[in-house]
Image (tube, rainbow, N blue to C red):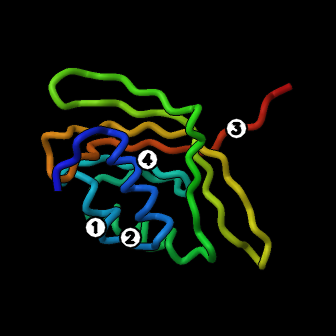
Amino acid sequence: MHYQNAEDVLSAWITGICNGTIDTVEALYHENAVLIPTFSPHTVNTTEGIRNYFEQLATRENLQVRLYEKSLKKQFLGGSAWILGGIYAFEFEVDQLLLTFPSRFTFAVNLEYEKPIIHHHSSQVPRNLS
């Protein structure tokens, strides 16, 4: 599937995470993609590693991702390449308690590719030092 704009890629990613459709999520990542994931200290740069990460994440009870729309920033890099950045929040249950993890993200996408995500960095928003 070819996406018309970078926001459609982000939307498909969020929908895939929320629905637990790992095939959909994995299909967004280019064969040479790099994932710096939210809940792992390890950078992932293989299709199998990306799939394993999201399969593990999908085991969380009531997993959801909410985009903070006002935080979304787009940068056009030329051609069909874009950077999307902002804040989303992962939500899931741990010991029957719903926890929320606000996280910063950056997606580098190239809409020329059938699998448009070429780089994805996500990290929990740190607490203020003050």
Q: Amino acid at mark 2?
A: Asn
Label 3 to label 4, Cα distance in Å? 16 Å
**Front residue of 1 and 39:** 1
At numbered mark 4, what does the secondary structure look like: helix, strand or loop?
A: strand
Q: Quadrant of residue 62?
A: bottom right
Give the label on residue 52, or none. Answer: 2
At numbered mark 2, what does the secondary structure look like: helix, strand or loop?
A: helix
Residue wearing tag 1? 48
Looking at the image, tell me whether mark 3 or mark 4 is earlier in sequence order.
Answer: 4
At numbered mark 3, what does the secondary structure look like: helix, strand or loop?
A: loop
Looking at the image, tell me whether mark 1 or mark 3 is earlier in sequence order.
Answer: 1
**Relative to 31, residue 104 above or below:** above
Label 1 to label 3, Cα distance in Å? 29 Å
Residue 112 as seen in the image, left or right of residue 38: left
Residue 110 as seen in the image, left or right of residue 55: left
Q: Quadrant of residue 15?
A: bottom left
Give the label on residue 126, or none. Answer: 3
Contact, mark 3 vs mark 4 (Cβ under 8 Å): no
Label 1 to label 4, Cα distance in Å? 14 Å
Q: Looking at this rendering, what residue extends furthest in the front direction?
A: 4
Residue wearing tag 4? 36
**Relative to 78, residue 44 above or below:** below
